[in-house]
Structure formats: C-alpha cells, structure tokens
C-alpha cells in the first residue's frame, strides 16, 4: 500500500471528522486488491495509532452513512466500499 486516496465526497462531508476520513482512506487502500478489506479493527487501529473502540465507532459511522458495507464470510468480516464495482456487481 503506497498511498491513501480519499474521494472528494468524503473529504467534503461535514458529518465526518478527520479520523473518519483517514479510516475510510485506509480501508479503501486495503480494498484495492480483492475488492474488499478484511482488516480487523485492531489492525486498522495499530496502523493509524487509534484505539479499537475508535475504529469500531468510525466503521459504524461510515456504514450508517453508506460509505461502506460489511458482510461476514467464514467468520471473517469483509468491508466493501459503497462506490466499489464489486459491491454494485459490475465485475
């Protein structure tokens, strides 16, 4: 993972704080290879030097605002970007 890209609509959304936006960017970057991210809250928290509870709250907020979707497969959470072609079934 070389860089984090944050969509303009996320950057401009006043409902999101800077932590929400950085978590969104990291999840997006981690989703590039498979179309989804399977990182745990612990992994994301360690990567960004944030607590697991902060990550949990942020993931919930991003879900409630429809920036991401999650599903569980074989006891593993997958996080999809809502604007992702995999989520929309265009692959």
Image (cartoon, rainbow, N blue to C red):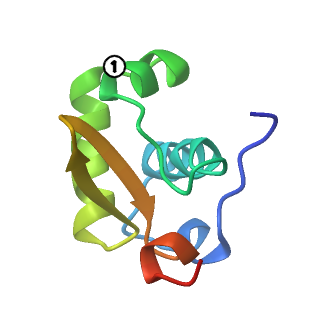
Q: Is residue 84 visible?
A: no
As helix, strand or loop, the secondary structure at mark 1 comes to: helix
Using the image, determine if residue 76 lies above or below residue 64: above
Q: Is residue 12 visible?
A: yes
Mark 1 crowdedness (10 Å alpha carbons): few <14, some 14-19, many ≥20: some
Would residue 19 be found to the left or right of residue 34 on screen? Answer: left
- Percent position (x, y) of residue 74? 21, 38
Would residue 17 be found to the left or right of residue 3 on screen? Answer: left
**Residue 69 picture quarter:** bottom left
Which residue is denoted by mark 1 in the rendering? 42
- Percent position (x, y) of residue 51? 31, 20
Quadrant for the N terminus, please: top right
Residue at 54 percent of width and 69 percent of height: 10
Would residue 19 be found to the left or right of residue 26 on screen? Answer: left
Residue at 21 percent of width and 28 percent of height: 53
- Percent position (x, y) of residue 9? 58, 77
- Percent position (x, y) of residue 91? 59, 77
Nearer to me, 78 or 42: 78
Residue at 38 percent of width and 51 percent of height: 79
Using the image, determine if residue 41 lies above or below residue 68: above
Using the image, determine if residue 4 lies above or below residue 5: above
Would residue 31 be found to the left or right of residue 51 on screen? Answer: right
């Amino acid at each position: 993972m070389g860089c984090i890209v944050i969509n303009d609509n996320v950057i401009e959304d006043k409902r999101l704080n800077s932590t929400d936006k950085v978590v969104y960017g990291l999840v997006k970057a981690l989703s590039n290879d498979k179309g989804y991210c399977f990182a745990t809250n612990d992994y994301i928290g360690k990567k960004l030097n944030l607590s697991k509870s902060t990550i949990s709250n942020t993931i919930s907020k991003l879900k409630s605002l429809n920036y991401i979707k999650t599903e569980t497969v074989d006891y593993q959470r997958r996080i999809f970007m809502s604007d992702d072609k995999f989520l929309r079934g265009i692959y």
